[in-house]
Amino acid sequence: MLDCGLDMTSTLNFLPLPLVQSPRLSKLPGWVLKDGSTFLDKELKECSGHVFVDSVPEFCLPETELLDLSTVDVILISNYHCMMALPYITEYTGFTGTVYATEPTVQIGRLLMEELVNSIERVPKAQSASMWKNKEVQRLLPAPLKDAVEVSMWRKCYTMPEVNAALSKIQLVGYSQKIELFGAVQVTPLSSGYALGSSNWIIQSHYEKVSYVSGSSLLTTHPQPMDQASLKNSDVLILTGLTQIPTANPDGMVGEFCSNLAMTVRNGGNVLVPCYPSGVIYDLLECLYQYIDSAGLSNVPFYFISPVANSSLEFSQIFAEWLCHNKQTKVYLPEPPFPHAELIQTNKLKHYPSIHGDFSNDFKQPCVVFTGHPSLRFGDVVHFMELWGKSSLNTVIFTEPDFSYLDALAPYQPLAMKCVYCPIDTRLNFIQVSKLLKEVQPLHVVCPEQYTQPPPTQSHRTDLMIDCQPPPMSYRRAEVLTLPYKRRYEKIEIMPELADSLVPLEIKPGISLATVSAVLHTKDNKHVLQLPPKPPQPPASKKRKRVSEDVPECKPLKPLLSGSIPVEQFVQTLEKHGFSDVKVEDTAKGHIVLLQEAETLIQIEEDSTHIICDNDEPLRVKLRDLVLKFLQKF
Amino acid sequence: AENEQVSPLQNLDVGRSCILVSIAGKNVMLDCGMHMGYNDDRRFPDFSYITQNGRLTDFLDCVIISHFHLDHCGALPYFSEMVGYDGPIYMTHPTKAICPILLEDYRKITVDKKGETNFFTSQMIKDCMKKVVAVHLHQTVQVDEELEIKAYYAGHVLGAAMFQIKVGCESVVYTGDYNMTPDRHLGAAWIDKCRPDLLITESTYATTIRDSKRCRERDFLKKVHETVERGGKVLIPVFALGRAQELCILLETFWERMNLKAPIYFSTGLTEKANHYYKLFITWTNQKIRKTFVQRNMFEFKHIKAFDRAFADNPGPMVVFATPGMLHAGQSLQIFRKWAGNEKNMVIMPGYCVQGTVGHKILSGQRKLEMEGRQIVSSPKWLLIDKACAFHLLLLQLEVKMQVEYMSFSAHADAKGIMQLIRQAEPRNVLLVHGEAKKMEFLKQKIEQEFHVSCYMPANGETTTIFTNPSIPVDISLGLLKRETAIGLLPDVKKPKLMHGTLIMKDNSFRLVSPEQALKELGLAEHQLRFTCRVHIQDPRKEHETVLRVYNHLKGVLKDYSVQHLPDGSITVESILIQATAHSEDQGTKVLLVSWTYQDEELGSYLTSLLKKGLPQSTS
């Protein structure tokens, strides 16, 4: 199974979870059907023309009905965003296999999960709405609730014990480490350049190579650059996790981010940056580190609020081996690879586990707050939206591309606060994809259907789709795709003793053949050929006499024969071996060689020889061996 | 049979490591150490041994450095910049980070303080490090198309690694120095069951089975405590990185628990830097430190402060960690000279000392030391021996009255650990290096007894050749393999089934296919060889009754074979056909025609001889 992501856009259908009682949210009117029925008004609330579920937010799981997950042997994780559904899979589906991921992926993935669990668990919600999920009811709801897929499969967030249990099933791996799976295939993670520890995977046998390219980046940010060379010679390349915003240039977005931030603060407003606790935030902090002094922002406090803020900042400094060259070099000095260490030391950046506690004492405005969750449905960000939303001095800057910012803002409308959309998605765009595909030249490309047509909202942009030859094969949710590949060979080892016993014969120039009769041993999907055991010595007892009468033990097949018998030479050979009365008769297809005295005849044709003799076994064996001398064995 | 050659350039004592391995045509140099006990040419390995003429770069495919200790990497700049080598040098990230620091430190002591020339420069260290490629643990590094290497955790010092070197199906594992028991800051060495043809293991503690670490630690703390209590000074000579951190963690927690006030110092220079490296490379430490580092970083010490040279003369008790660890130069030696005369003081040697160093001398019981010094020391304990020495080099005698303790805290595997590693890796041969001959001999016997593998211990410059017998990888057509494994799955698996195929050898490729496919691929037709024999049987019955009798007879004898009686009156045994006709002259004699192809030769031949004996008397 490749990756185990969680679709969190489902949470956009829910009301935000406020950390502090929010009069505005609690006063929202219940939703009433067109016909005036009010039976859903406890579950659904209306805000500025949108309808939201008033319940604990729920997530859309990966497809689990299509196959029996207990038959999945291995899950390969490509980056920490793509493992968020892991506890649902490892704990509740009968899955007993192994999960493979790099160390940063696991450590930061744990932080993301911890933050998620924490932000949902610390705001206990009495209500768990389920009536609206009824198919008959869902039909009556306004969009987008009406069109939400598989709502019956949506699940509440997992708990920390489940997270810990899931993570304990992960086996840590390093880039370019070859991992044998059951002796049958080898998997190898490669740097994908997108995030700390993010990987593409090579899945290969001796003859077939499948590359799984997911969430890769060719831009130089903090992670180790993408390893492209190792993707060459793939039979199949599965391509996914491209940029969500193909039209936005990340560098331009960072510039816009900085200037909007500076402008707001200069005007006395606060800046809210909804973000994940790891990833792009490291790059943003690094940009700000270079920017704040020149922009005159040295006295503006930067706050990073997350239950895992401290851990995230600390962890970022210890993964030197997974960082880009520049950052690695710093560690050799030894200096911390990320400059946020200095921001913290100089008190420019402060981090807190939550808005409660120390933060409320230190809090000074105007300021810049980085906090989660980017969906604006839970986490400390909800508090700041409620707090700052009413003033047009403040700005919320969206940098994470996973959620539509308009949908994210919907339950906060009407909003006076400025909203700036600077999505920073460093993953591959379509120009980079076609460059990459030209470079690594896979035989076949497989990708999600969306990538094979222009985005629905920009149907004229035919440049925003994958363009390669042969055209990519696309897949959809719950669809089975057969790859155009036929396996023809497998590796087998010939033991040295057996190899020594082989007698190669040159059949054609440069081509030699040897017939092999050997015992096949197969263990852990590894095949070995050994010398056949010597026939057991007959025990030196009275039974000995009867040996020849024993039924032949196994069935030692003789090799196939090829070639033809030159009659004249054959007759000469017979005469040399003492047959004096050889007579040759021509037939339509060949010859008949007669041994008159022995009452034996040998029919010789182009592709066959038939020895017909009476009851004289030694004679038959002699003739057999003489015939074999003229033939090749296979 | 192919072979592997191992030539230790310098290793048959713990002086330094430098080993040359030739495996399947590839030449790899393992470690490039310097000998700390020599001050002349002998301190570097004799690289002219590798190639008399020709460049090292052409001869060596790569160089691998196992860890940052100078007896494993100290000759590297000399080797790459002064002798000349431009190929790749592999080491782990922490080793790459720390190694140049230690080289520079050693260079300073040698050149700046001792005034030696003909030594590598700072620039040479930098140029040398540019040739280094850093490797991750467990990453398979493809040095070239055939040669690959892979690092495993060794637990000896930060970043220490064992390396697997592999060419085709032949492989060697080189352990460098390793430790099989986790300690306060590092984890235990680990390797998978990689079954190398040869395991080259260090054997520093070949005969020692060390008592529990806990006892040693208690002992150490007790001695330090007692000395401090009676107002004495404790000198602990260490390498800046490695055991130093381990002992610092130990003392730090002890001071905390016992609420002790005596100062602990760590000789300046490398200390802070060293601890920084530990913080940044925390993923290389043990599980416990890694897990808790966000809350409390074990390498931020409260009680341990930076040492200043002037402190050595302060009255009262103190504990000082000073470099280098073998008391051969630098600050540790300076402090030792100052404190050696007082019986209240103590020096604790926490690691191995190379022959020729002051450390080694005092550990072997020597209490009167001849020392070289560049200035006349006014202390009355110094005795002028030779005035005529060049460069004002004076040989002085120092009497050691302070207590000398040796406590093995070096993170080397002991005999038990070495055996454990062999059990883990399951090598076909073992080669011992980096140990003392007598002890190695003992361990060699033990290994041969327990694992039944050959064990070697070559002398310096001696070449050991190990013959390997690799099996030959071949491509088998999936059709043939599936046919054969399907047969193998039949219930009757007691008898080994023979598999038949044809090996096609063409342009160095080996393919095993079914004979039919081989014929087809080569465009050849099969030549069928058939035999027909007449067997006469005396049986007056009608033909079809005779046939039935033959059928029943064969069925009874050939239980494992498919015997069939066909509607046309013939009998088949597998593919062998038997037909009966009455004799044209004698109706009492029936003629059985037995016909088979060469592929069924054995069975056909058996059948004719069986039928020749006639049919058994009817039981009816």
Image: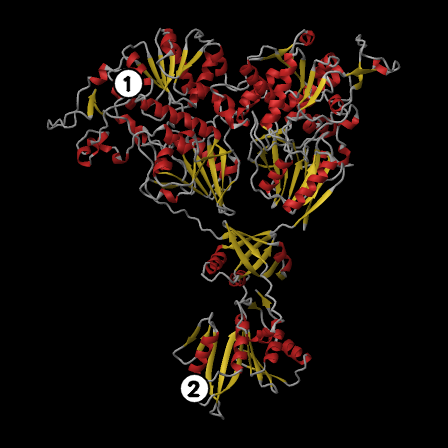
Q: Is residue A263 left or right of residue A206?
A: left
Cα–Cα gap, marks 2 and 1: 101 Å
> Foreground: A514 or A352?
A352
Task: Give the image location of residue B461, x and y in percent.
Answer: 76, 37
Q: Chain of mark 1?
A: A
Q: Which quadrant would residue A160 be assigned to in this image?
A: top left
| In the rendered image, the vertical position of residue B252 relative to residue A570, given as above or below | above
Query: Of helix, strand and loop, which one carries label 2?
Result: helix
What chain does mark 2 sit on? B
Q: Quadrant of residue B211?
A: top right
Which residue is labeled 2 in the image?
Answer: B543
Q: Where does residue B446 sit, x and y in percent of width and height? A: 67, 42
Question: Foreground: A448 or A526?
Answer: A526
Q: Amino acid at mark 2?
A: Glu
**Type of the residue with mark 1:** Pro
Would residue A272 be seen by someone viewing this image from the given angle?
Answer: yes
Looking at the rendering, in which quadrant would you find the C terminus of chain B?
Answer: bottom left
Residue A333 visible in the current orientation: no
**In the structure shown, which secondary structural element does the residue marked by tag 1 occupy?**
loop
Which residue in the protein does label 1 denote?
A18
Report x, y in % for residue B127.
67, 24
Q: Residues within 10 Å of mark 1 (few under 14, many from 20)?
A: many
